[in-house]
Amino acid sequence: MASAPSKLYADDVSLVVVLLDTNPFFWSSSSLSFSQFLSHVLAFLNAILTLNQLNQVVVIATGYNSCDYVFDSSSDLNRSFENGRMPVMCSSLLQKLEEFLIKDEQLSKEEPEGKIKSSLFSGSLSMALCYIQRVFRSGALHPHPRILCLQGSPDGPEQYVAIMNAIFSAQRSSVPIDSCYLGSQNSAFLQQASYITGGVHHKPQNLDGLFQYLMTIFATDLHSRSFIHLPKPVGVDFRASCFCHKNTIDMGYICSVCLSIFCKHHKKCSTCGSVFGQAQSEAASASDKKRKTPET
Amino acid sequence: MASAHVTKRAKYKTTIKDPGTPGTLRMTFEKILFVPHNPKSAGKLDVEFRYIKGQKHTKEGSNKPPWLNLTNNQNGSFIFEFENYSDLQECRDFVGKVLAKGGEVSEKPTVAYPDEQLSAAEMELRIKLLQEDSELQKLHKQFVLSGVLTETEFWATRKKLLDREASKKTKQRLGFKSAMISDIKPSTDGRTNKVTFNLTPEVILQIFAEKPAVHRAFLSYVPNKVPGALKQFFSSSSWPVNNDPIMSERTFWTKYFRAEYLHSTKNSIAAAAEAAEDEELAVFLKQDDILASEARNKIRRVDPTLDMEADEGDDYTHLPDHGIFREGNKEMTESQNELYKRSLSQDINRHAAVVLEGRAVVFLFENIHVSLDCICSMNLNVDVELEDTKAVAEALAQSKQKSSNKGESDGDTSRERLDRLSRMTEIEDLQGPNTLPLAPLCIKDPRDYFDSQQANALRTSGDALGGIEQIKCGLSTQEVYGSLRESISSIKAMGLKEPIFKPEVAHQVFDALTNSISNTKYHIGKNPQESVLDRLPRKTKEELLHHWTAILELLKHFWASYPITTTYLYAKVNRLKDAMSNIYPQLEEIKGSVPSELRHQVSLLVRPMHQALDAAIQHYEASMQKRSAQSGERPNGYV
């Protein structure tokens, strides 16, 4: 903990964990180029670190096949990346990011083609929460953590359960999840994440001014937020993904035992095995049959 | 008649809110004359009494000043504020007399105020309610004092309120005191050895309830002074009444306390000796046989499957008083005189049972004073000054009779016992397997589940995402990763873009953000916690709320008086209609008084009030038309 040896944390000291979407499929189709995006974000991270001497920034790359920590302001910086064109912080981040991308690409070669283009948001969210838990346990005094998701790729409905679990654990440890969505559609996951955890969700209209959005909306620490009017969403997309087909639905069936969500009526809950709307005596024989033919 | 005129200092008020003009009020049988102190002021008044229809006045004890309100036949009124209530009273009586006299000539003397005959308690209750509820008080002031509603009408709609207040008191019945009778300590006056016991019917009732044997003895020994019918009842009841040894009430109680004294000394030998001498005293000293049989009955009713031996370890009752001092004397255990001993735990248990049972009869007799003169060697001398003791004893006997009748009904208890015994005893060998037809809950390995779903997910979500993503699928993974790495290396080579973006863009962003923030901030009604009323000035808010309650009150009375069947209701509806039409300009006034940016809100709030009033007045007019049409057909029809 080089930046904070004394641990004299005031209420405006923040730990910002930034989840950076590095999904190559999204960035190749986006109107904002990845290099532009990076320059906005790097400037923003620099700004946060200069807002308070004790502020801490952690960057996690949300890849297509994997996630990893690419930057931690509390660890010692590697001077070897210094090249005079930009701060050491930026160059080391870029170096790590490049390494991450190479690894991610290697992983993807084993994957079949035609997979949906969502990033591994649930993974990076979990990593962020793990990091924050470690900070919580480091002692009574710690910076106030928050998570900022910079995401552009669409939601992966198959990650619904994992993401919701991560959101609820963030809510439990009172870590707000701020989200900034850069893609064309809006993300129901990010909206719900911010709504549930009390964070801010925003979808910038003008991506050229991304830095301005980041500075205006997401730079303020949690304490100061109570004095500031931040943009409020007009509505939140509360739709859930069904467990059976991973469709996003606004109306469906819910298992009365385990609260699993289904888009169609099923005879039996595929998560916990409860039998719906049948005489109890038939349950045993029916469940045996069902197991052989998994899902239709 | 005491005097032909009354002269008082008073203030004349044209309305309730008017501060009033100070002056002198002079009333004769013919007219009312008010002369202001200041000859220049305009409040001079000279009214003939025959124009006065009725009077109203504020009540003493209500927190209103002493006001007298004289109503004339043009629905106008004269309000006088007096210096004190006695002045008001005098004037009121005078006006009452004059009006009563005039009433002999005119058809109706005064407006009827049936509430004038209200009991003081009722009046007090109303005043209390008014004092507790300022809103109610406001309404009362507004409508009753201005004559829109009469006092009775006003309270008729609030019967529940009155009832609730009144019923609060009688809900709970008084039970027995938890203090034990043995706590009744005799009072001594240091000089002589005289001991005085103070017996109240309360105490006697408790003694009877706790010691049925004493009760029985009282009924049989003390001569009955009650009429034959009751006596017959007692002789036919289960209480054995043997009329041979007649005793006065005084001797009865003397013997009782003597026996109590012997108990308190814990000298069972002495007790036994005394009992041998005196047969009646023995009744008090022996174990209560009625209690014993009752206890046996109770034990019979206990669930036979209950293992009472298991509790024996916790039971202290078999130990004599388990070492507790009673009346300061340690008990000496002497087994042969067991008969004349009572244990403290027995007493406590019996007392607890009686207290829990509660009292079936509530007695409110005057106190009985039984004074016992205890001189030297227990020569007791009792003064009993009350016959009501008998009534106490008999009433208790009656209530006991009732409850014992109930108890008698379970004659076939022994069979029931057997039934229950057979039901409760479980023979495990003969029982079938005790498994419920429920499927056990099993949460499968989630990974397993998600793997099986993968195929579906791929298919369906592939369909869902159309448009741009679909086109870009054409690019191979290698290409996309390559372009991404390229952009990173380009930053590394070029450094950060300088400046990051143009100032115009920043300006645009700011504009858009402030616009959207201010839009959502002033979104009315989005936030349920924030009421529109809270943003109005305090005064306006209060006025609006008050108008609401006032309008509701008027409408309640208005609609309740339909259909109009009597002239009284007709007059009432007219009065209410006038009061309602007076509210319109007041509402307009409120609208005008608020700042322009809030006017829209206020008019939104006022609109439902208008609608409610409009509906009422419309109904009024329609019914008036119908009435006039009907009365046109039948000129001398109903009123």
Image: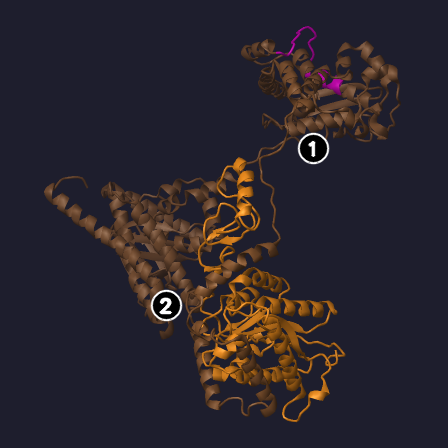
Residues shaded magenta? B238-256
Out of B96 and B195, give the one closest to the viewer: B195
Please name the residue that numbered disc 1 is placed on: B178
Q: Is residue B4 above or below residue B327?
A: below
Image side of residue B390 versus residue B601, left or right: right
**Amino acid type of the residue tagged 1 in the rendering:** Ser
Give the Cα distance between marks 1 and 2.
63 Å
Query: Is B252 one of the magenta-colored residues?
Result: yes
Please name the residue that numbered disc 2 is placed on: B601
Question: Which is more foreground, mark 1 or mark 2?
Answer: 2
Out of B559 and A163, give the one closest to the viewer: A163
**The color chain B is rendered in:** brown
Residue A142 rendering spot, x and y as whole percentages: 70, 72
Image side of residue B32 versus residue B116, left or right: left
**Amino acid type of the residue tagged 2 in the rendering:** Gln
Q: Which chain is orange?
A: A
Does the image show residue A175? Answer: no
Residue B214 rendering spot, x and y as whole percentages: 70, 17
Label 2: chain letter: B
Out of A178 and B406, give the one closest to the viewer: A178
Label 1: chain letter: B
Query: Is B402 one of the magenta-colored residues?
Result: no
